[in-house]
Image: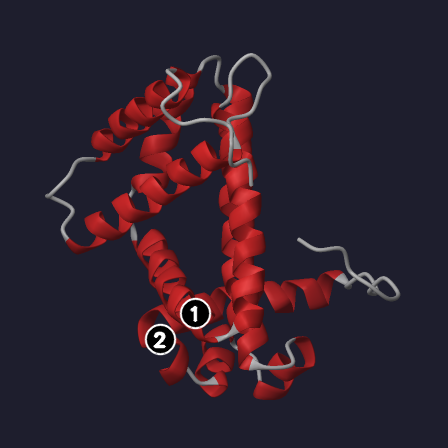
C-alpha cells in the first residue's frame, strides 16, 4: 500500500469497528450474489441489519464498500497463509497444508471468488480501483515469495507473481468445473514451476 498523507485517522471504537466489519461481510455476500451494478446499498444495509444511514456513516460510497470488502477478504487470506508458513517445517509440508485450505470450494470461498471476479472487471474500467487492487496483489505476492522461498531467501518477484497467477487461474477453472482438475494438481504445478525457476529457466530479472 502507498503511504497515507495528512493526519492519521482516529482509532475506531470497538462498536464502530464491529459495525464496519458486519457491513463489509454483508457487502461481500450481496456483491457475490448480485454483482456490483445490481447490488444496492439498501440491500447491503438490510443484509447487515443496519440502516442505510449507518452504512454511509462508515463508507462514503458503494465503491468504497466494494473495495473494502475485497481488501478485508485478502487480508484474512494473507494472514492465514503466514500462519500456515510459521507452522510448517518444509516447503512440501507447507504446500500440503496450503492446498486444501485455499482450494476448498465452500460457500464462503465461492462468494469470495465471485467478488474477486467482479472486482477484476470493475478495476479494468476504474483506475483508482485498479491501484488498490494492485496494492493487494503486491501484498499477496510478497507473502507468497516469503512463504515459498528457501534458506531465508524469498522467491524472485516474477516467480511469486506466476505462482499467484497460476493459483488464480486454477481456482477460476475449478469454480466452473470442479471435476476437471483435482486440488492436488495445483501442488504439482507449483512444484514444476519452482523446479523450473531453480533450474534457471525463470531468472531474477523481474523482481516486482
Q: Residue at x 33, y 27 (%)?
A: 193
* Residue 123 % position (x, y): 46, 68
> Could you give the CA–CA distance between mark 1 and mark 2, rounded to whole angstroms?
15 Å
Nearer the observer, 87 or 154: 154
The structure residue drawn at horizontal position 26% and vertical position 44%, both measured from the top left corner, is: 170
**Secondary structure state at the residue bearing disc 1:** helix
Q: Which residue is mark 1?
A: 124
Left or right, 167 with respect to 188, comes to: right
Q: Are marks 1 and 2 in contact (CB under 8 Å)?
A: no
Mark positioned earlier in the residue sequence (1 or 2): 2
Answer whether residue 83 is visible to the viewer in this image: no
Q: Quadrant of residue 83?
A: top right
Q: Residue at x 56, y 23 (%)?
A: 86
Q: Is 26 placed left or right of 186 in the picture?
A: right
Q: Is residue 122 above or below residue 198?
A: below
Query: Which residue is identified by label 2?
Result: 35
Outermost residue toward the left in this view: 179
For mark 1, does the 10 Å Cα neighbourhood hold few (<14), some (14 to 19), or many (20 or more) residues? Answer: few
Identity of the residue drawn at 64% across and 83% down: 56
Q: Quadrant of residue 195?
A: top left
Residue 34 at x, y percent in the picture: 33, 77
Q: Is any atom of residue 125 visible in this view?
A: yes
Q: Residue furthest right?
A: 7
Residue 77 higher or lower than 184, as above or below: below
Instruction: Indicate the position of residue 63 as horizontal and vertical percent values.
Output: 54, 77
Amino acid at each position: 500500500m502507498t503511504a497515507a498523507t495528512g493526519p492519521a485517522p482516529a482509532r475506531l471504537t470497538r462498536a464502530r469497528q464491529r459495525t464496519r466489519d458486519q457491513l463489509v461481510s454483508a457487502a461481500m455476500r450481496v456483491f457475490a450474489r448480485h454483482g456490483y451494478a445490481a447490488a444496492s446499498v439498501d440491500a447491503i444495509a438490510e443484509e447487515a441489519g443496519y440502516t442505510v444511514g449507518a452504512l454511509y456513516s462508515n463508507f462514503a460510497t458503494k465503491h468504497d464498500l466494494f473495495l473494502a470488502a475485497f481488501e478485508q477478504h485478502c487480508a484474512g487470506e494473507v494472514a492465514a497463509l503466514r500462519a500456515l508458513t510459521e507452522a510448517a517445517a518444509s516447503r512440501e509440508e507447507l504446500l500440503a497444508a496450503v492446498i486444501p485450505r485455499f482450494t476448498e470450494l465452500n460457500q464462503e470461498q465461492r462468494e469470495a471468488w465471485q467478488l474477486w471476479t467482479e472486482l477484476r472487471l470493475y478495476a479494468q474500467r476504474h483506475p483508482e480501483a485498479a491501484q488498490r487492487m494492485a496494492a493487494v496483489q503486491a501484498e499477496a505476492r510478497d507473502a507468497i515469495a516469503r512463504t515459498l522461498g528457501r534458506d531465508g531467501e524469498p522467491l524472485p518477484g516474477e516467480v511469486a507473481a506466476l505462482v499467484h497467477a497460476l493459483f488464480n487461474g486454477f481456482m477460476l477453472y475449478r469454480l466452473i468445473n470442479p471435476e476437471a482438475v483435482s486440488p492436488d494438481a495445483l501442488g504439482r504445478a507449483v512444484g514444476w514451476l519452482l523446479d523450473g525457476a531453480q533450474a534457471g529457466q525463470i531468472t531474477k530479472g523481474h523482481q516486482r
